[in-house]
Amino acid sequence: MKIRVRDITRDLRLQPRATIDPTLVGEYAEAMRDGAVFPPVLVFFDGKVRRLVDGFHRCEAALVAFGERAEIEAEERSGTYEDAFVYSLSANSTHGARRTNADIKRSVERALAMWPHRTDRQIAEICRVAHPTVMAHRARMAAEANGKVYQLETGETVSVEDLQTTERRGKDNRQRRLPERQPKAPVRTLRDADEGPADDVPEQPVEAEDEPALPPAPKDEDPMPEPRRARPERREPEVEYRQPSAVPPPRQPFVPVLFPGTAPADEPPDPRAAEDARAEADVQRLERMIDAFLDQHPRHAARLGQFLQGMMLRVNGEARRRGQL
């Protein structure tokens, strides 16, 4: 359906891109003037407001190309502001210009500001990113917060306490406490070993361990156990070796067997005859392929005829060039 661009609400909070690329807008506008057909933009309509969630560059290009009365092809879905917000977080993840790191950062920050108590995997699934990316942005936002609040570029804010909360809400809407993670031991390299012990790792005194006492042996038994018997050595079976005879048996002379129609062994084979035989075999194979094509695709017999006519013209031209016609 066609909708006037001015009737569509372009809310910056639903903008999936970090910035509008003027170069891309100019290219789209020039293509629209030339008659290029673009995919429809996506808007969510709640009965009063049509909110744009996908197609900000195309709407800007339509205004540049056709002015205030510009119309654009749009796909309209029914949904509230929250539905539009959820969709905008993953927009352009599978089509359009590839998302930049700034676009992914904007999407993850908006999702964390809206749902700071959700798990990182839930946020990653909504934004179509890897969950380690969400973990890194959550830690960065808490570290870069000015005081106790982190402010986004869109003006939205989220508290550091909510970002660093240890209670997260899962898909089943149940709240769980995150398990405590033990700090990893510092990894030492061979260079560190040459330089000596690390300054931040205190040396632990080495204590001699007491050897475990052996249980007393019974009175009726010998305290020293008998040694194990050694396994018998494995011997390879002996192979009888026979001395070869001094005089080898005489070799039988080679007598070539000639079949009817073949040349004698003392005459070299004719290369033209071998080439003619291969050509005849290839022609027969080509005929079988054409028969199989007609059996499997009878409706395309006319197309095959056109192809064979073109090939005949090509073959005849090659034969005339070689003086064979």
Image (cartoon, helix red, strand yellow):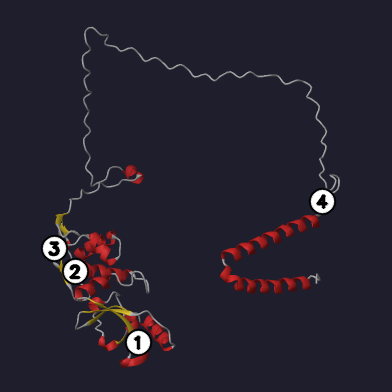
Give the answer, above or below, for where 87 lies relative to 273. Answer: below
Q: Is residue 310 left or right of residue 324?
A: left
Q: CA distance from mark 2 to mark 1?
A: 32 Å
Q: Mark 4 is on which residue type?
A: Pro
Q: Mark 3 is on which residue type?
A: Glu
Q: Residue at x 81, y 31 (%)?
A: 252
Element type where label 3 sits in the image:
helix
Q: CA distance from mark 3 to mark 2?
A: 12 Å
Instruction: Report the residue marked by disc 1.
Output: 62
Other residues around mark 1 within 10 Å, as few (<14) / some (14–19) / many (≥20)? many
Residue farthest top in this picture:
220
Q: Nearer the viewer, mark 4 or mark 3?
A: 4
Instruction: Report the residue marked by disc 3.
Output: 161
Q: CA distance from mark 1 to mark 4?
A: 77 Å
**Is the residue under label 2 in contact with that under label 3 (CB below 8 Å)?**
no
Q: Nearer the viewer, mark 1 or mark 4?
A: 4
Other residues around mark 3 within 10 Å, as few (<14) / some (14–19) / many (≥20)? few
Q: Nearer the viewer, mark 3 or mark 2?
A: 2
Element type where label 1 sits in the image:
helix
Q: Which mark is residue 269?
A: 4
Q: Nearer the viewer, mark 2 or mark 1?
A: 1
